Amino acid sequence: MLALDVDFIVPELTLARTTPAMADLVELSDASHAKAKALAARFGA
């Protein structure tokens, strides 16, 4: 096999901006999205 080391990056609360019941979680969603983007940039380089 290839013996690849795989890391999963999972942003959380992705529906917070489009679901009215999750309006209180938008800030947490934004933080999770930013963290996921930063990790993807770091691991993708």
Image: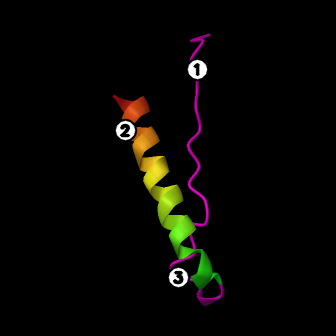
Q: Which residue shows up at 54% across the image and 66% down it?
A: 29
Residue behind mark 2? 41
Q: Position of residue 10 (x, y in %)?
A: 59, 49
7 falls in the magenta region: yes
Marked residue nearer the N-terminal end (1 or 2): 1
Circle 1: residue type: Asp
Q: Name the kind of residue labelled 3 in the image.
A: Thr
Q: Which residue is mark 3?
A: 18
Q: Residue at x 48, y 49 (%)?
A: 35
Helix, strand or loop status at disc 2: helix
Secondary structure, mark 3, is loop
Residue 27: x %, y % from top left: 52, 71
Q: Is residue 43 above or below residue 40?
A: above
Q: Nearer the viewer, residue 43 or 31?
A: 31
Q: Residue reaching furthest left? A: 45
Circle 1 or circle 2, nearest the eye: 2
Q: Amino acid type of disc 2?
A: Ala
Which stretch did the figure color magenta?
Answer: 1-21
Is residue 13 shown above or below 20? above
